[in-house]
């Protein structure tokens, strides 16, 4: 990671770049797939999570300041609008946020401050998707 006072590290760099984002995303879907606490959230997703593992990791990479391939592949796509057609209540949003916070804690990025901030802001994003 090369940064100067004029170019502070992006969240993407601080979290540990693509390898750590991929590990968090994989852990998130592993938890969703295996822990009955997330059964309702799991049931909303397709049986095969391969596409989601790639898409969420790509989204998180670009959103945190890294490679923007996901946006190139999904021009104009808004993550909030993309969830409008799903019925999302507070319980299922809390399942998403809890699984994500656990995934981040399990991967344990070296920079704990950015790891906590990431978990908090993603939980707020999930809460903002509640529409039912
Ligand atoms: C609030 C709770 C949430 C629920 C219930 C939810 C549910 C879903 C569902 C059912 C899908 C489609 C899955 C499939 O086709 O198998 C999806 C797609 C997706 N979700 Fe969520 N989601 C939530 C929060 C979030 C958040 C907070 C983010 C981003 C930080 C996110 C990122 C994505 C991405 C990247 C996709 C794939 C979009 C695409 O490539 O077309 N989701 N979500």
Image (tube, rainbow, N blue to C red):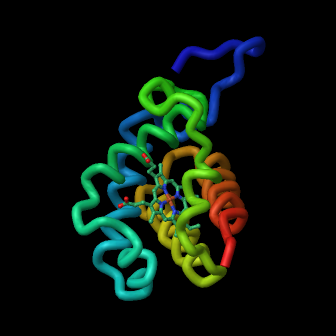
Residue that appears at 63% across and 64% down: 126
Residue 8 placement: quadrant: top right
Task: Left or right? Give the position of 131 relative to 33.
Answer: right
Q: Position of residue 11 (x, y in %)?
A: 62, 36
Residue that appears at 76% across and 15% down: 5
Q: Position of residue 85 (x, y in %)?
A: 55, 63
Residue 77 or 1: which is nearer the viewer? 77
Give the residue furthest to the right. 6
Q: Position of residue 118 (x, y in %)?
A: 63, 51
Residue 21 placement: quadrant: top left
Residue 77 or 100: which is nearer the viewer? 77
Residue 25 or 93: which is nearer the viewer? 93
Residue 130 placement: quadrant: bottom right
Task: Left or right? Give the position of 122 relative to 40.
Answer: right
Residue that appears at 42% across and 53% down: 24
Q: Position of residue 18 (x, y in %)?
A: 41, 35
Report the number of discs: 0
State which quarter of the image contains the C terminus: bottom right
Give the residue furthest to the bottom. 36
Task: Left or right? Give the position of 127 relative to 104.
Answer: right
7 to 105, vertically: above or below: above
Residue that appears at 39% across and 84% down: 39
39 to 6, vertically: above or below: below
């Amino acid at each position: 990671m090369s940064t100067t006072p004029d170019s502070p590290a992006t969240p993407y760099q601080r979290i540990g770049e693509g390898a750590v984002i991929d590990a968090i995303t994989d852990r998130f879907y592993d938890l969703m797939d295996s822990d009955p606490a997330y059964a309702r959230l799991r049931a909303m997703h397709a049986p095969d999570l391969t596409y989601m593992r790639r898409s969420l990791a790509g989204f998180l990479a670009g959103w945190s300041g890294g490679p923007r391939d996901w946006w190139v592949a999904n021009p104009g796509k808004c993550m909030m609008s993309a969830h409008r057609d799903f019925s999302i209540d507070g319980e299922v949003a809390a399942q998403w946020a809890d699984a994500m916070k656990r995934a981040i804690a399990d991967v344990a990025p070296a920079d704990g401050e950015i790891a906590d901030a990431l978990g908090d802001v993603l939980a707020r994003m999930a809460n903002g998707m509640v529409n039912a």
